[in-house]
Image (cartoon, rainbow, N blue to C red):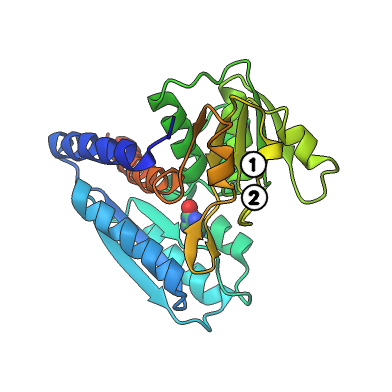
Amino acid sequence: MILDGKTCSEQRLKILRDVITESGFRPQLATVIVGDDPASKMYVRMKHRACERVGIGSIGIDLPGNATTGDVVAAVRRLNEDPTVDGILVQLPLPPQVDAKKVIAAVSPDKDVDGFHPCNLGLLFAGTPRFAPCTPLGVMTLLGANRIPVAGKHAVVLGRSIDVGRPMAALLLSADATVTICHSRTPGLAGIARQADILVSSVGKAMFVTADMVKPGAVVIDVGINDLDGKLVGDVDFAAVSGIASAITPVPGGVGPMTIATLMENTFKAAQERSCDRAP
Ligand code: GUN
């Protein structure tokens, strides 16, 4: 089975558009981009386009590539204070002179639709999530939409980043999976991957997950986005692994669209919660 994230995301966006229309809310997302990395600019454009489709307003703050940590933190603080802004997304990666941890910590946890603030990651790990990061939450939605059971399964997550690997493990754990996180210092990674009922790869290396690393019948989720000789590919050797897995996400058209749909859902949630906070 191909886990079609594009179709699932389209369905979620249509439902969200109706929910937003009926709610009478006009949520607003602010994006912050530093420099002019073409891939980052393209991702931010896609996010603004999705906002337009579902009835979320969006504003974009573009800072020059030589901006300092102080400049980016100041821009974030202005958005924290702006009552018309419900969600703030600082596009990553940031240039090397900018301390990403300080910038992420400057985002108000109430507007942290990316779910990267330590408060929100802490709540997620405590089992009481508020905003969960969009990519792993989108993966959970895709598994659910395809009725793939998670409880009691052995899930192996390759990668330990704060945007994917760690929150992915927390969400799978909350869904009652037995979770193993593997990373660049894990000995025998291939053997551990082969034990997975659900294998999630967010390593960022083309052709990293080969057929010998996948148990027959496993569910394979490919979060990688890599350039292989000018072609967009994931971490998984799709041609070989799709013959072994029971279900697999394609790249493109798998996890990527789910990330964007989830960002829209998180932004609406932020708007709803902020409006509750303002109620007498
Ligand atoms: N860069 C790559 N993925 C993401 C994401 O989900 N959020 C942000 N802010 N930046 C990213």
Q: Which residue is mark 2?
A: 161
Residue 115 place in picture, x, y as percent = 50, 45
Q: Is residue 111 above or below residue 73?
A: above
Taking the spot 25% from the left edge, 48% from the top edge, the residue there is: 27
Q: As drawn, is 280 to the left or to the right of 256?
A: left
Residue 82 in sight here: no
Q: Are marks 2 and 1 in contact (CB under 8 Å)?
A: yes
Q: Nearer the viewer, residue 266 or 238?
A: 238
Where on the picture, by quarter, is residue 254? Answer: top left
On residue 116, the disc is: none
Residue 253: x %, y % from top left: 39, 47
Check disc 1 and report the residue beneath it: 166
The local crowd at label 2, few if under 14, some if 14 to 19, many if 20 or more residues have their Cα within 10 Å, is: few
Q: Nearer the viewer, residue 71 or 192?
A: 192
Residue drawn at (55%, 49%) of the image: 117
Towards the viewer: 14 or 70 = 14
83 relative to 136 in the view: left or right? left
Q: Quadrant of residue 81?
A: bottom left
